[in-house]
Image (cartoon, rainbow, N blue to C red):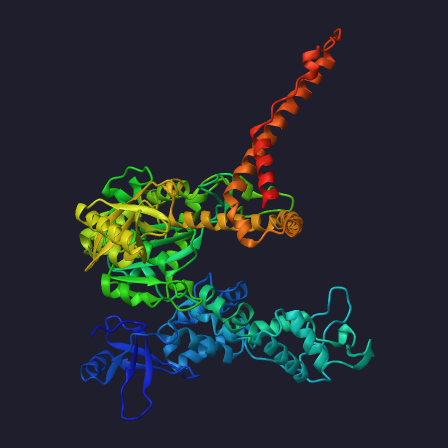
Amino acid sequence: MEIYRNRIFEWLSDSEEHEIYRIIWIDVPPTKVVVIRLHIESLETITLEYESLQSAIAAREIRFLERDPYSCYVLPDHVLSKKSCARRYKIWTLIESLVVSGIPDIFDSRKRGEMIRDVIETTKVSKQSLYTYVRIYFQRGQSINALTFDSHKQGGKGKERIAEPEDKKWGRPSRDGERTGINKTQEVVEAFEYARELLESGEQKTQKKALREANKKFFNVGYEERDGELVAILPPKEELPSPRQFQYYCSNHVDIVKLKRAAVGENRFNANCRPLSENATARAYGPGAIYGFDFTVINTYLTSLLNPADIVRRAHLCIGVDWFSHMIVGAVCNFEEESWIGYQLTIENAALDKVEYCDEYGIDIDRDQWPCVGTPAAGYIDRGGAFSRNLAHVTRSTGINFSIAPPYRPDFKGIVEILIHIANCLACGDTPGSVPKVCGRGDKDYRLDACLNIYEFRRLLLRAILFYNQYQYIIDYPNDLFMIADGVKKIPLELWNWGIENRGNYLTYHDQSYLHSNLLPRAEASITTYGLTFEGNYYKCDLAEVQQEIEIARQRVSVKKRREKVWISYNPHEKSTVIYLDLGRGNLAPCHQVAKNKTEKFVGLSFHEIKVYRANDAQEARDQEARQQQPLVEKETHHNATVKAAVERTEQAVEESGLSRNARKKGIRENTKLDREFEREQRNQNTQSKTAQEVDTSQSILPPKQSQQPTIEQKKYVAPPSHLSLLHQLANEDKEKT
């Protein structure tokens, strides 16, 4: 092994304490070697034969050390203070003649003494100081920076000083000349410890309040009763510890992590303040390995589909994100709050072909623009609405192994949290009706600007997702060397395609009928005489065999007068135009909506919107029922009065006529005929009287004419009796005979 200057070695011996040396000089040609012993306070140099040192190395009596124990003391200039640099150069000027031009004489103890005496005479520096400087120079590697000594140990840094009560005030005087604060005595330390405990436990949120509580407990001069309460009396400020003293004490003794946890709470600290241990992207090796799902509320108020003048609440958005490529693989926007049904629909949306889905909203894309089709190997969801007993069913049917995030820990799925915020911002933007970041007093109510309905917003959302997947550059994406070598841009679509090609495809394909059967919610529909009905809508199946069975069931219902129940699968948030009839064994038959007179207005609306309409209709009926109370009271009052008067009149007429019950019932037909004729005669007379009144009115308007005297024949004329009067006359004669 080669021998170099400044090399450190350990001389192995039988004793437990091994001696460590540094090679400080090698003769030229190499015949002698000078070493100095380390970790001692004396300048002890030893001259060895070069060959004997090589022999010791060959005999394994010497072991070279790779780490220099003094490397931490040799600091670069930018780390040292100006004072340390100035002291270093001052020491170097004292020993430069000894350690540079004095070699090898400095290694001889006799000559070394004479050389040091000469330096003492010229510099007036003590002998002990010069020996110390030379020893440190050789022990620490023979560099000028080694002469900085242990500056980090100077000044008693880290040592706590506690004053006695009788000591004079420490520190510089205040600028205004007034005496402020007291020395840090043992009593002050106890008060500071009490204030620190208040801070770390969360009882007090600020240092000023904690110090004030400590002052009330440790430095009060008594108590006074004020308004029935004992109030601590504090001494003047020059007899109390200053806030700056307590601030300095906290900087050295308070656990910042513990203090922050007490201030913000355990849950918020774990979510926002704890150190990060890993990147969630690294947990997914390729596309489809892990999908994350999450819910949020969109930032835009919408309008009703039934009446654009009505404002509805903000919808809920659930998205699925691939953890490897950060690609948005599915999205569902509806008015339902966070629930397991929303997660099921998002999983189904992520697994289906996006070309058909975008075509429903008038967006024409190629499959390469959104190639996410299939279910992932694993899923990560919230503990809230996704925590359902149906989770095991979806795992058994689709093979997705779900992991549930701990409560109050959104940091476990940070990729989904940030992407759902990005999708929300891209879709809403400056859309009318969006919630502003700052809303001042007197500003216009942003809800009145709402103009989009739910379908229009979904169209904007899909375009925002397509933009993000194809063009969004992810600055902080942790790409590896293989991606860099292949020139992969940190764009979700390119990362997805590269992962499919190089990392494998973790997706599982299921046909549409299988996904509908296992992911869509199920409900009972009815077969009535009108056909298959669900939620008040009527449906007809496109399959002839199934429709024929429905028709046969309709005939049974018409005979039995009782509905038959069947199971269906449906999407509660999409249009109600399609439901899926369960044929058993996972087979579904699509059924399309048929317009009837009562349900024609519901064509094209979702089940949720139909429910909203019916709820509003029922509420309006209840409101109208409340408005009907006063008119009903008035009607019933007149009704009761009329009935009462008729009862009294009838009872009096029956009593005067003396007719029996059978006699009253026998004449019903004749009495009805007489009343009909009588009413007809009365109507004719009323019509004639109205005509006469009109004639009199017209004659009063026209100029007066000469009146003519009636003739004798006109005076003697009498009108013939009517049929009604003859009938009445015959009836009276019959009554007189009886």
Could you tell me which residue is drawn at 30 percent across and 72 percent down? 5
Vertical order, 540 against 215 (above or below): above
**Viewer-proximal residue, 100 or 328?**
328
**Viewer-proximal residue, 47 or 84?**
84
Q: Position of residue 93 (x, y in %)?
A: 48, 67
Q: Position of residue 456 (x, y in %)?
A: 40, 40
Could you tell me which residue is drawn at 60 percent across and 77 percent down? 196
Q: Residue furthest front?
A: 737
Q: Residue furthest top?
A: 706
Q: Answer with left or right where residue 201 lies relative to residue 326.
A: right
Q: Position of residue 261 (x, y in %)?
A: 51, 71
Q: Is residue 64 visible?
A: yes
Q: Position of residue 733 (x, y in %)?
A: 60, 39
Q: Residue furthest bottom?
A: 15
Q: Answer with left or right where residue 278 lies relative to residue 720.
A: left
Vertical order, 705 against 139 (above or below): above
Could you tell me which residue is drawn at 71 percent across and 17 percent down? 697
**Viewer-proximal residue, 105 or 360?**
360
Q: Quadrant of residue 189?
A: bottom right
Vertical order, 503 against 36 (above or below): above
**Viewer-proximal residue, 32 or 163?**
163
Q: Quadrant of residue 463?
A: top left
Image quarter in which the N terminus is found: bottom left
Q: Quadrant of residue 36?
A: bottom left
Q: Is residue 478 visible?
A: no
Q: Answer with left or right where residue 22 lies relative to residue 409.
A: left
